[in-house]
Protein backbone atom coordinates (compact mmCIF):
# COMPACT_ATOMS: atom_id res chain seq x y z
CA UNK A 1 0.00 0.00 0.00
CA UNK A 2 1.39 3.37 -1.00
CA UNK A 3 1.08 6.48 1.10
CA UNK A 4 0.68 10.04 -0.23
CA UNK A 5 3.11 11.41 2.35
CA UNK A 6 6.81 11.60 1.68
CA UNK A 7 9.35 12.64 4.27
CA UNK A 8 12.30 14.75 3.13
CA UNK A 9 15.50 12.76 2.74
CA UNK A 10 17.32 15.19 5.03
CA UNK A 11 14.85 14.36 7.82
CA UNK A 12 15.09 10.62 7.20
CA UNK A 13 18.87 10.77 7.54
CA UNK A 14 18.84 12.79 10.78
CA UNK A 15 19.42 11.32 14.21
CA UNK A 16 16.65 12.34 16.61
CA UNK A 17 17.67 14.68 19.42
CA UNK A 18 16.37 13.48 22.80
CA UNK A 19 17.31 15.87 25.61
CA UNK A 20 16.70 14.26 29.03
CA UNK A 21 14.18 16.82 30.21
CA UNK A 22 11.77 14.65 32.22
CA UNK A 23 11.91 13.66 35.88
CA UNK A 24 13.97 16.68 36.96
CA UNK A 25 11.53 18.40 39.33
CA UNK A 26 12.79 19.01 42.89
CA UNK A 27 16.33 17.92 42.00
CA UNK A 28 19.52 19.97 41.84
CA UNK A 29 19.75 20.37 38.06
CA UNK A 30 23.41 20.71 37.16
CA UNK A 31 22.95 18.96 33.81
CA UNK A 32 21.66 21.57 31.35
CA UNK A 33 23.68 24.74 31.92
CA UNK A 34 20.54 26.44 33.18
CA UNK A 35 20.69 28.93 36.02
CA UNK A 36 20.18 26.95 39.27
CA UNK A 37 19.93 30.28 41.09
CA UNK A 38 16.76 31.17 39.19
CA UNK A 39 15.64 34.45 37.65
CA UNK A 40 15.54 37.93 39.13
CA UNK A 41 12.66 38.67 41.55
CA UNK A 42 11.95 41.63 39.26
CA UNK A 43 11.10 39.15 36.49
CA UNK A 44 8.55 37.35 38.64
CA UNK A 45 6.95 40.63 39.69
CA UNK A 46 6.70 41.75 36.07
CA UNK A 47 5.15 38.44 35.00
CA UNK A 48 2.60 38.68 37.82
CA UNK A 49 1.41 41.99 36.34
CA UNK A 50 0.94 40.53 32.85
CA UNK A 51 -2.72 41.22 32.10
CA UNK A 52 -5.33 39.21 30.25
CA UNK A 53 -5.36 41.70 27.38
CA UNK A 54 -1.64 41.23 26.80
CA UNK A 55 -1.98 37.46 26.86
CA UNK A 56 -4.88 37.37 24.39
CA UNK A 57 -3.24 39.74 21.86
CA UNK A 58 -0.38 39.13 19.47
CA UNK A 59 2.79 40.44 21.14
CA UNK A 60 4.33 43.80 20.27
CA UNK A 61 8.11 43.65 20.48
CA UNK A 62 9.40 46.97 19.12
CA UNK A 63 9.61 48.71 22.51
CA UNK A 64 11.53 45.79 24.02
CA UNK A 65 13.75 45.65 20.94
CA UNK A 66 14.71 49.32 21.45
CA UNK A 67 15.46 48.71 25.12
CA UNK A 68 17.50 45.61 24.27
CA UNK A 69 19.47 47.58 21.68
CA UNK A 70 20.35 50.17 24.31
CA UNK A 71 21.21 47.43 26.84
CA UNK A 72 23.60 45.71 24.41
CA UNK A 73 25.03 48.90 22.88
CA UNK A 74 23.72 48.51 19.32
CA UNK A 75 21.12 50.16 17.09
CA UNK A 76 17.63 48.59 16.88
CA UNK A 77 18.26 47.96 13.16
CA UNK A 78 21.22 45.73 14.14
CA UNK A 79 19.23 43.46 16.46
CA UNK A 80 16.61 40.74 16.05
CA UNK A 81 14.78 39.20 18.99
CA UNK A 82 14.40 35.43 18.65
CA UNK A 83 12.57 32.56 20.32
CA UNK A 84 15.72 31.52 22.15
CA UNK A 85 19.08 30.99 20.49
CA UNK A 86 17.64 27.90 18.80
CA UNK A 87 15.35 29.98 16.60
CA UNK A 88 18.24 32.33 15.89
CA UNK A 89 20.34 29.45 14.56
CA UNK A 90 17.40 28.19 12.50
CA UNK A 91 16.97 31.69 11.09
CA UNK A 92 20.63 31.80 10.01
CA UNK A 93 20.23 28.53 8.13
CA UNK A 94 16.92 29.57 6.57
CA UNK A 95 18.36 32.86 5.36
CA UNK A 96 21.73 31.75 4.03
CA UNK A 97 21.91 28.00 3.41
CA UNK A 98 20.89 26.04 0.32
CA UNK A 99 20.75 22.23 0.20
CA UNK A 100 24.21 20.71 -0.27
CA UNK A 101 25.99 23.85 0.97
CA UNK A 102 28.92 23.16 3.29
CA UNK A 103 28.66 24.23 6.93
CA UNK A 104 31.51 24.17 9.42
CA UNK A 105 31.31 23.25 13.13
CA UNK A 106 33.98 22.15 15.59
CA UNK A 107 32.79 19.20 17.65
CA UNK A 108 31.86 18.27 20.29
CA UNK A 109 29.66 21.33 20.62
CA UNK A 110 26.05 22.48 20.91
CA UNK A 111 23.93 19.87 19.14
CA UNK A 112 21.58 22.37 17.50
CA UNK A 113 24.25 23.55 15.03
CA UNK A 114 24.29 20.11 13.44
CA UNK A 115 20.53 19.68 13.90
CA UNK A 116 19.51 22.72 11.81
CA UNK A 117 22.29 22.12 9.29
CA UNK A 118 21.16 18.54 8.67
CA UNK A 119 17.53 19.63 8.50
CA UNK A 120 18.46 22.01 5.67
CA UNK A 121 20.22 19.23 3.78
CA UNK A 122 23.64 20.86 4.19
CA UNK A 123 26.94 19.00 4.15
CA UNK A 124 28.72 19.31 7.48
CA UNK A 125 32.47 19.65 7.91
CA UNK A 126 33.33 18.88 11.54
CA UNK A 127 36.94 18.94 12.77
CA UNK A 128 37.23 17.89 16.40
CA UNK A 129 38.85 19.01 19.62
CA UNK A 130 41.72 16.75 20.67
CA UNK A 131 42.03 14.89 23.98
CA UNK A 132 43.41 18.04 25.64
CA UNK A 133 40.38 20.01 24.34
CA UNK A 134 42.59 22.18 22.15
CA UNK A 135 40.99 24.06 19.25
CA UNK A 136 41.95 22.36 15.94
CA UNK A 137 43.38 25.45 14.23
CA UNK A 138 44.98 23.77 11.22
CA UNK A 139 41.83 21.87 10.29
CA UNK A 140 39.58 24.88 10.83
CA UNK A 141 41.70 27.22 8.71
CA UNK A 142 41.94 24.60 5.95
CA UNK A 143 38.15 24.23 6.00
CA UNK A 144 37.64 28.00 5.85
CA UNK A 145 39.85 28.24 2.77
CA UNK A 146 37.28 26.07 1.00
CA UNK A 147 34.62 28.73 1.71
CA UNK A 148 31.84 26.98 3.69
CA UNK A 149 28.56 28.88 3.69
CA UNK A 150 28.35 29.18 7.51
CA UNK A 151 30.72 28.57 10.42
CA UNK A 152 28.96 28.03 13.77
CA UNK A 153 31.42 28.94 16.54
CA UNK A 154 30.35 29.16 20.20
CA UNK A 155 32.66 31.22 22.39
CA UNK A 156 33.12 29.78 24.96
CA UNK A 157 32.30 26.32 23.65
CA UNK A 158 30.16 23.78 25.44
CA UNK A 159 30.91 21.14 26.65
CA UNK A 160 34.67 21.77 26.45
CA UNK A 161 34.73 25.26 28.03
CA UNK A 162 37.27 26.68 25.54
CA UNK A 163 37.42 30.44 25.05
CA UNK A 164 39.03 32.04 22.00
CA UNK A 165 40.57 35.49 22.46
CA UNK A 166 39.56 38.48 20.35
CA UNK A 167 42.88 38.16 18.50
CA UNK A 168 42.05 34.55 17.63
CA UNK A 169 38.56 35.54 16.52
CA UNK A 170 40.06 38.22 14.26
CA UNK A 171 42.22 35.50 12.73
CA UNK A 172 39.11 33.45 11.95
CA UNK A 173 37.25 36.36 10.37
CA UNK A 174 40.28 37.21 8.26
CA UNK A 175 40.35 33.61 7.00
CA UNK A 176 36.60 33.56 6.25
CA UNK A 177 35.76 36.27 3.69
CA UNK A 178 33.23 33.98 1.93
CA UNK A 179 31.65 32.53 5.07
CA UNK A 180 28.97 33.76 7.45
CA UNK A 181 30.66 33.41 10.84
CA UNK A 182 28.15 32.89 13.65
CA UNK A 183 29.73 33.50 17.06
CA UNK A 184 27.41 32.18 19.74
CA UNK A 185 27.99 34.14 22.96
CA UNK A 186 25.50 32.23 25.13
CA UNK A 187 27.99 32.27 28.02
CA UNK A 188 29.33 35.80 27.49
CA UNK A 189 28.48 37.00 31.00
CA UNK A 190 30.81 34.38 32.47
CA UNK A 191 33.66 34.88 29.97
CA UNK A 192 33.60 38.65 29.39
CA UNK A 193 34.69 38.29 25.74
CA UNK A 194 32.38 39.74 23.06
CA UNK A 195 32.63 40.79 19.43
CA UNK A 196 29.25 42.51 19.12
CA UNK A 197 30.90 45.87 18.22
CA UNK A 198 32.52 44.19 15.19
CA UNK A 199 29.21 43.70 13.34
CA UNK A 200 29.47 47.20 11.82
CA UNK A 201 32.69 46.38 9.96
CA UNK A 202 32.07 42.70 9.19
CA UNK A 203 28.94 42.00 7.14
CA UNK A 204 29.66 38.29 7.40
CA UNK A 205 29.60 38.28 11.23
CA UNK A 206 26.55 37.22 13.24
CA UNK A 207 26.56 37.22 17.05
CA UNK A 208 23.94 35.43 19.13
CA UNK A 209 23.06 35.93 22.79
CA UNK A 210 20.52 34.34 25.12
CA UNK A 211 18.60 35.24 28.26
CA UNK A 212 18.60 31.55 29.28
CA UNK A 213 21.88 31.46 31.19
CA UNK A 214 22.86 34.42 33.39
CA UNK A 215 19.34 35.92 33.35
CA UNK A 216 17.68 32.58 34.16
CA UNK A 217 14.92 32.73 31.53
CA UNK A 218 15.45 29.36 29.82
CA UNK A 219 11.81 28.40 30.34
CA UNK A 220 10.56 31.44 28.45
CA UNK A 221 12.81 31.17 25.36
CA UNK A 222 14.20 34.53 24.28
CA UNK A 223 17.49 35.44 22.63
CA UNK A 224 19.04 37.98 20.28
CA UNK A 225 20.86 38.13 16.97
CA UNK A 226 23.31 40.98 16.33
CA UNK A 227 24.33 41.57 12.74
CA UNK A 228 25.15 44.35 10.25
CA UNK A 229 21.97 46.30 9.51
CA UNK A 230 21.92 45.23 5.85
CA UNK A 231 22.08 41.57 6.82
CA UNK A 232 19.50 42.14 9.56
CA UNK A 233 17.01 43.44 6.99
CA UNK A 234 17.54 40.30 4.93
CA UNK A 235 17.13 37.99 7.92
CA UNK A 236 13.88 39.67 9.02
CA UNK A 237 12.36 38.55 5.72
CA UNK A 238 12.92 34.93 6.77
CA UNK A 239 11.56 35.37 10.33
CA UNK A 240 8.00 34.89 11.49
CA UNK A 241 6.25 38.14 12.50
CA UNK A 242 5.75 37.09 16.15
CA UNK A 243 8.82 35.08 17.15
CA UNK A 244 8.79 35.97 20.88
CA UNK A 245 5.80 35.52 23.17
CA UNK A 246 4.37 38.25 25.43
CA UNK A 247 5.60 36.69 28.68
CA UNK A 248 9.15 36.37 27.38
CA UNK A 249 9.17 40.01 26.28
CA UNK A 250 7.99 41.19 29.70
CA UNK A 251 10.53 38.97 31.46
CA UNK A 252 13.46 40.07 29.29
CA UNK A 253 12.66 43.74 29.87
CA UNK A 254 12.61 43.19 33.64
CA UNK A 255 15.83 41.15 33.51
CA UNK A 256 17.63 43.94 31.65
CA UNK A 257 16.54 46.45 34.30
CA UNK A 258 18.01 44.33 37.09
CA UNK A 259 21.69 44.41 36.12
CA UNK A 260 22.63 43.90 39.78
CA UNK A 261 21.01 40.44 39.82
CA UNK A 262 22.98 39.35 36.73
CA UNK A 263 26.20 40.69 38.27
CA UNK A 264 25.55 38.77 41.52
CA UNK A 265 24.80 35.62 39.56
CA UNK A 266 28.04 35.89 37.59
CA UNK A 267 30.09 36.48 40.75
CA UNK A 268 28.53 33.44 42.41
CA UNK A 269 29.10 31.20 39.39
CA UNK A 270 32.74 32.28 39.14
CA UNK A 271 33.25 31.48 42.83
CA UNK A 272 31.67 28.08 42.22
CA UNK A 273 33.98 27.51 39.25
CA UNK A 274 37.03 28.01 41.47
CA UNK A 275 35.53 25.81 44.20
CA UNK A 276 34.74 22.96 41.80
CA UNK A 277 38.27 23.08 40.35
CA UNK A 278 39.74 22.87 43.86
CA UNK A 279 37.52 19.90 44.65
CA UNK A 280 38.49 18.01 41.50
CA UNK A 281 42.16 18.57 42.30
CA UNK A 282 41.64 17.13 45.78
CA UNK A 283 39.87 14.11 44.32
CA UNK A 284 42.51 13.60 41.64
CA UNK A 285 39.88 13.95 38.90
CA UNK A 286 40.87 15.46 35.57
CA UNK A 287 38.97 18.61 34.59
CA UNK A 288 39.27 21.17 31.82
CA UNK A 289 39.45 24.94 32.41
CA UNK A 290 36.17 26.60 31.49
CA UNK A 291 35.06 30.15 30.71
CA UNK A 292 31.37 29.23 31.00
CA UNK A 293 28.94 28.34 33.79
CA UNK A 294 29.97 24.68 33.60
CA UNK A 295 33.04 22.48 33.85
CA UNK A 296 33.89 19.34 31.88
CA UNK A 297 35.42 16.58 34.01
CA UNK A 298 36.74 13.11 33.21
CA UNK A 299 35.72 10.31 35.56
CA UNK A 300 36.83 7.51 33.23
CA UNK A 301 35.28 4.06 33.63
CA UNK A 302 33.48 5.16 36.82
CA UNK A 303 31.28 7.64 34.95
CA UNK A 304 27.97 5.77 34.72
CA UNK A 305 28.19 4.68 38.36
CA UNK A 306 28.97 8.23 39.53
CA UNK A 307 26.22 9.86 37.45
CA UNK A 308 23.65 7.31 38.70
CA UNK A 309 24.77 7.66 42.32
CA UNK A 310 24.47 11.45 42.17
CA UNK A 311 21.00 11.14 40.63
CA UNK A 312 19.91 8.94 43.54
CA UNK A 313 21.08 11.73 45.85
CA UNK A 314 19.00 14.26 43.90
CA UNK A 315 21.82 15.82 41.87
CA UNK A 316 21.76 15.70 38.08
CA UNK A 317 24.89 16.06 35.93
CA UNK A 318 25.28 15.48 32.19
CA UNK A 319 27.08 12.42 30.87
CA UNK A 320 28.71 13.63 27.63
CA UNK A 321 30.73 10.48 26.95
CA UNK A 322 28.94 9.81 23.67
CA UNK A 323 30.24 13.15 22.32
CA UNK A 324 33.81 11.93 22.70
CA UNK A 325 33.41 8.38 21.48
CA UNK A 326 34.48 6.87 24.78
CA UNK A 327 33.61 6.50 28.42
CA UNK A 328 34.30 9.12 30.98
CA UNK A 329 33.23 12.71 30.27
CA UNK A 330 30.72 14.59 32.43
CA UNK A 331 29.67 18.24 32.20
CA UNK A 332 28.71 19.87 35.49
CA UNK A 333 26.75 23.13 35.59
CA UNK A 334 27.84 25.68 38.18
CA UNK A 335 25.25 27.04 40.57
CA UNK A 336 25.63 28.76 43.91
CA UNK A 337 28.64 28.12 46.10
CA UNK A 338 26.39 26.15 48.48
CA UNK A 339 25.11 23.98 45.62
CA UNK A 340 28.64 23.29 44.40
CA UNK A 341 29.77 22.36 47.91
CA UNK A 342 26.82 19.99 48.22
CA UNK A 343 27.89 18.32 44.96
CA UNK A 344 31.48 17.99 46.20
CA UNK A 345 30.34 16.47 49.52
CA UNK A 346 28.33 13.83 47.69
CA UNK A 347 31.12 13.18 45.21
CA UNK A 348 33.58 12.66 48.05
CA UNK A 349 31.38 9.89 49.46
CA UNK A 350 30.89 8.26 46.05
CA UNK A 351 34.53 8.39 45.07
Image (spheres, grey):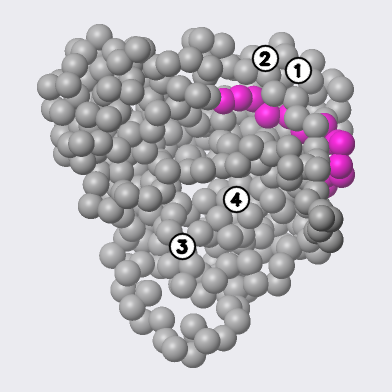
Circles 2 and 1: CB atoms closer than 8 Å? yes
Residue located beneath label 2 in the image: 137
From the viewer's perspective, is the residue at label 3 or at label 1 nearer?
Answer: 3
Tell me the SS state at disc 2.
Answer: helix
Which callout, 3 or 1, points at the residue further toward the start of the chain? 1
Tell me the SS state at disc 1.
Answer: helix
Which callout, 2 or 3, points at the residue further toward the start of the chain? 2
Circles 1 and 4: CB atoms closer than 8 Å? no
Mark 3 vs mark 4, CA separation in Å: 12 Å
From the viewer's perspective, is the residue at label 1 or at label 4 nearer?
Answer: 4
At x 66%, y 60%, the residue is: 80
Apparent side of residue 80 relative to residue 262 in the rendered image (left or right): right
Residue located beneath label 4 in the image: 86
Mark 2 vs mark 1, CA separation in Å: 6 Å
Tell me the SS state at disc 4.
Answer: helix
Say which quadrant the N terminus sits in: bottom right
Q: Position of residue 271 (x, y in %)?
A: 26, 33
In magenta segment, residue 159: no
Apparent side of residue 254 relative to residue 60 in the rendered image (left or right): left
Overall secondary structure of the magenta section = loop
Q: Nearer the viewer, residue 92 or 75?
A: 92
At x 57%, y 25%, the residue is: 108
At x 32%, y 69%, the residue is: 44
Circles 2 and 4: CB atoms closer than 8 Å? no
Q: Few, some or many C-alpha atoms within 10 Å of disc 4 (few <14, some 14-19, many ≥20)?
A: some
User: Which portion, as a residue range, is magenta?
Assistant: 96-108
Residue located beneath label 1 in the image: 141
Amino acid sequence: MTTPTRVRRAVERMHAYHPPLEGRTDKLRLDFNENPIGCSPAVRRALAKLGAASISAYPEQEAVCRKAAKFFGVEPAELLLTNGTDEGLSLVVNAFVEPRDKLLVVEPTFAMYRFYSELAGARIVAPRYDAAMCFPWNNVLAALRAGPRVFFLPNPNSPTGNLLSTRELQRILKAAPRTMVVIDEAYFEFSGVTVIPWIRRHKNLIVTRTFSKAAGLAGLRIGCIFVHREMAATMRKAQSPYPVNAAALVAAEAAMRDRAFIARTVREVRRSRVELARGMKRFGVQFFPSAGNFVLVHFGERTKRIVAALARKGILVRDRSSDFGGEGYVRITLGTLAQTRRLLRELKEIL
